[in-house]
């Protein structure tokens, strides 16, 4: 699969617009169990990414991913900055313009591990990892119509965080009271997967 | 002056960071290089990697820098900031697992005595119940 300049630009614009469009929802989710800044922070980060879309997509795929990562680290502000920043920086280290599915799987696995190390967290603790790990498994499986399947996996995985009890992050202060709300980081990860799937399927 | 370990204070609030720094200066004097920052890139509550890197630079000492943080994102952002430092500096900056105000004062007191980075960190972390 070739990730050319136009595809890179479509990916950046699709992901950034999706996060910006849903920022209020992310903030509402975060207000329920965190400090209510996830949407605002992510909007700030991805607005900066969107503003640099042309410049970023002119670079190689690896360099544009790293550029997204650095922008998120510098602009997001909350813990989500280093976490999403690490995800994109790690992906950028191993992906080039011409990629096979195996390379994507390998790069995504390394990136998810890097996020796990950065957040000192494990799956099952009501975080973005609870979406990223199932998506990695779906990516690994591949097969026909897999963008649509990744979308469904991400949606279900985000919903599965509702009954979980938070162990990491601000939500962990709430303990049992974090149960019953979707994790905002899981939701933002789902949105990103969904926006990437749109591009893969030719919708965006 | 930079013979002592530097101290960096990172809070979600610029007021808390500045206030803590003022307490440190009043109690320990100016023999300890001090940097502080608070607030997200737009000036709201939060932390910024860029600002943390600048604070580390301000407090830089060849003996190293100890960072005191308040809540979750401050810690994650501080660790990210350390990773983005030039390689030669990276190993000489630590995040202390200690309460931000008391930790900063204790760490600075220890630093003012010419202690090593490890000793400064240990002193701050003694405040954390095990």
Image (tube, coloured by chain):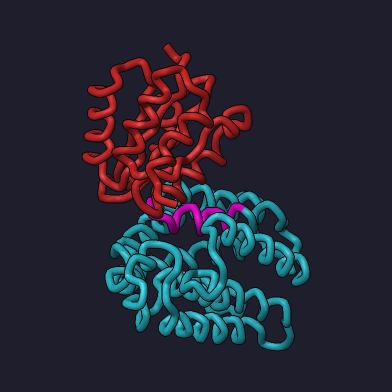
Chain colours: A cyan, B red
Residue under the point 38% across and 20% down: B32
Give above or below for A106 relative to A59: below
Q: Which of the pair A129/A51 is nearer the observer? A: A129
Seen at 46% across and 80% down, the residue is A161
Q: Residue at x 50, y 69 (%)?
A: A128
Q: Where does the N terminus of chain B fall, quadrant-wise?
A: top left
Residue A35 at x, y percent in the picture: 29, 62
Residue B118 located left or right of residue B12: right
Residue situated furthest top in the rendering: B1
User: Is A8 on the left-hand or right-hand side of B68?
Assistant: right
Predominant SS along the magenta part = helix
Range shown magenta: A77-89
- Percent position (x, y) of residue A181? 35, 80
- State the count of labels: 0
Residue A44 horizontal/vertical position (percent): 36, 55
Task: Inspect the magenta stretch and tell me whether residue B60 lies in it.
Answer: no
Residue A64, can we see it?
A: no
User: Which x, y percent locates residue A105?
Assistant: 72, 69
In terms of image quadrants, where is residue A10?
A: bottom right
Asked if residue B71 is positioned above or below residue A29 in the image, the reply reads above
Q: Is residue A79 magenta?
A: yes
Question: Does residue A143 appear anywhere in the picture?
Answer: yes
Residue lying at 54% horizontally and 63% vertically, measured from the top left: A121
Residue A123, placed above or below residue B52: below
Q: Nearer the viewer, residue B29 or A159?
A: B29
């Amino acid at each position: 699969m070739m990730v050319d300049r136009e595809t890179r630009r479509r990916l950046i614009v699709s992901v950034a617009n999706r996060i910006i469009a849903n920022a209020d929802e992310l903030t509402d989710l975060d207000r329920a169990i965190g400090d209510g800044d996830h949407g605002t922070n992510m909007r700030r980060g991805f607005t900066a990414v969107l503003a640099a879309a042309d410049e970023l997509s002119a670079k190689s795929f690896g360099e544009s991913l790293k550029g997204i990562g650095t922008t998120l680290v510098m602009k997001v502000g909350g813990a989500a900055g280093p976490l999403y920043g690490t995800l994109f920086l790690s992906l950028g280290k191993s992906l080039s313009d011409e990629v096979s599915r195996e390379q994507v799987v390998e790069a995504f696995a390394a990136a998810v591990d890097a996020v796990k190390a950065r957040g000192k967290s494990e799956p099952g603790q009501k975080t973005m990892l609870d979406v990223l790990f199932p998506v990695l498994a779906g990516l690994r499986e591949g097969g026909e119509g897999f963008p649509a399947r990744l979308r469904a996996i991400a949606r279900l995985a985000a919903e599965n965080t509702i009954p979980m009890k938070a162990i990491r992050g601000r939500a962990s202060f709430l303990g049992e009271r974090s149960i019953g709300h979707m994790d905002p980081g899981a939701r933002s990860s789902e949105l990103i997967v969904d926006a990437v799937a749109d591009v893969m399927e030719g919708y965006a | 002056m930079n013979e002592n370990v530097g101290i960096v204070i990172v809070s979600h609030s610029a007021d808390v960071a500045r206030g803590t720094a003022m307490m440190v200066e009043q109690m320990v004097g100016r023999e300890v290089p001090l940097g502080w920052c608070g607030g997200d890139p737009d000036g709201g509550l939060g932390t910024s990697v860029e600002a943390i890197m600048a604070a580390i630079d301000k407090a830089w000492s060849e003996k190293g820098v100890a960072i005191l943080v308040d809540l979750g994102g401050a810690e994650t952002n501080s660790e990210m900031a350390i990773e983005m430092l030039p390689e030669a500096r990276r190993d000489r900056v630590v995040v202390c697992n200690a309460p931000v105000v008391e930790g900063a004062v204790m760490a600075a007191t220890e630093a003012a005595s010419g202690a090593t980075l490890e000793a400064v960190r240990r002193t701050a972390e003694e405040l954390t119940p095990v």
